[in-house]
Image (cartoon, rainbow, N blue to C red):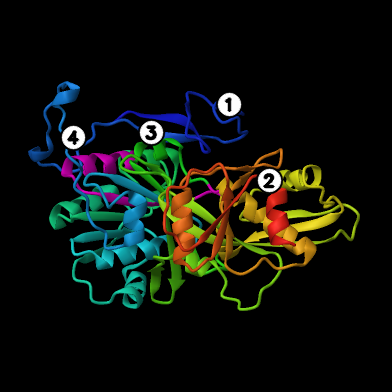
Amino acid sequence: MAKTKTAFFCQNCGTQYAKWIGQCTSCKQWNTIVEEIVQKEEKKTWKTSSSTLQKASKPLRVNEINSDKEIRFNTQDIEFNRVLGGGLVPGSLTLLGGEPGIGKSTLLLQIALKLPYKTLYVSGEESQKQIKMRAERIHPSSENCFILTETKTQNIFQQIVALEPDLVVIDSIQTLHSDYIESAAGSISQIRECTAELIKFAKESNTPVILVGHITKDGTIAGPKILEHMVDTVLQFEGDQNYVYRILRSLKNRFGSTAELGIYEMQGSGLREVNNPSEVLISKNDENLSGAAVAATVEGIRPLLIEIQALVSTAVYGTPQRSATGFNAKRLNMLLAVLEKRAGFKLAAKDVFLNITGGISVDDPAIDLAVIASILSSNFDTPIPKGVCFAAEVGLSGEIRTVQRTDQRILEAEKLGFTSIYVSKNNKITLKDTKIKVRLVSKIEDVVSTLFK
């Protein structure tokens, strides 16, 4: 009879304790310590045959290690490949998180259906008929995708051994449970144990595994924080359910950059890849309206043009409101203070509302100048001339500061038909023979004098 013992785990961060305490010493949260039963017994490998037994590794000199580039699986999805850094690495574990109903299962099922490789899609949340109904809308004629509805890891590995798939998708990790742990599915110890078993399988069989992870109300992936440390890649699927656009970001990537961005459009037939997001993030209004400005930003290696809308009105209740959607509210207050102090615009008694269209959030400081231009345009009720965009950071003294990759931003603006772009005069621009007019400015006053004459 295996010896059974209990342990105490923090449900917020996963820290283990020998006894119950009121406050977790790691994350400082109260009443998050829960007792769980942990069964100690000899564990079998994911595959019972002796072919998985590996010899102990030995140390190698740095110059002896093979540094050939990793061979990657092409997922047949340009946006997904870009965020991963070129495709799935064999033997890697990828964790995809996102809000309920945002489209995580749809995205992975769509990839599994279109792949030319043998794929096993394991679902612990939906029946095979439910998945079939969704598959008929996305890609009904797939012969390489196999659907399994199972939550017990030992049964899943039996099917993996029989099928020998090239890719395994688990939806979701919170629904799995292992016989080696006697706590409920979704608990700290179950998530950690099931992930460890999947990592062992992925590394020994050189098969990539994609996990779907639930998130908490704070937006973090549910379960122990160690889950994000164990996997190779952590992806975040974002978007507002009131908008049709979804954004795929990389929070951690051992095989590529974490600054990449993928954009999808939710349709009835699945998620459509948006290869040129600048065209969908800029409105097609023929009327020239005040309070709108276009900024040239960069996400990873991808330049984007986004539209920023501002509304400035007299405060009704005495205390002015400051509201920003998709932009840092504290940075908005800082830019308003710069306009008040350095440029002499009296905005202290006015409400200011700011919105980045398309439902996306941008942290690039290069959109500062576009934010200021949209605020002043709304304040003067004077539209910004068509064909004008901005790419510069604004300092606390009112100076226009340089930003990185200015050449890429200029080329993207030129490609979309813009006629002029405002950048800092301290930028080193190497482009020649461009049709777009590059306006070099050093202070906010220079921008105001040319835009609002």
Q: Which of the marked residues, 3 or 4, is nearer the chain's N terminus?
A: 3
Q: Nearer the viewer, residue 90 or 356?
A: 356
Residue denoted by label 3: 38
On screen, residue 61 above or below 153: above
* Residue type for callout 2: Lys
Q: Which of the marked residues, 3 or 1, is nearer the chain's N terminus?
A: 1
Which residue shows up at 19% across the image and 64% down it?
116
Q: Residue furthest right?
A: 318
* Residue type for callout 3: Val
Q: Position of residue 248 (x, y in %)?
A: 43, 56
Marks 4 and 3: in contact by CB < 8 Å?
no
Which residue shows up at 32% across the image and 49% down it?
85
Circle 1: element type: loop
Q: Which of the marked residues, 1 or 4, is nearer the chain's N terminus?
A: 1
Residue denoted by label 4: 67
On screen, residue 144 above or below 184: below
Residue denoted by label 1: 21
Q: Nearer the viewer, residue 7 or 277?
A: 277
Which image quadrant for residue 91? top left
Crowding at label 2, few (<14), some or many (≥20) Cα neighbours within 10 Å?
Answer: some
In this picture, residue 151 sits left or right of residue 222 = left
Crowding at label 4, few (<14), some or many (≥20) Cα neighbours within 10 Å?
Answer: few
Of discs 1 and 2, which sits in the foreground?
2
Which residue shows up at 63% across the image and 55% down it?
370
Q: CA distance from mark 3 to mark 1?
A: 18 Å
Which image quadrant for residue 421? bottom right
Residue denoted by label 2: 443
Bounds of the magenta segment: 193-219
Which image quadrant for residue 396? top right
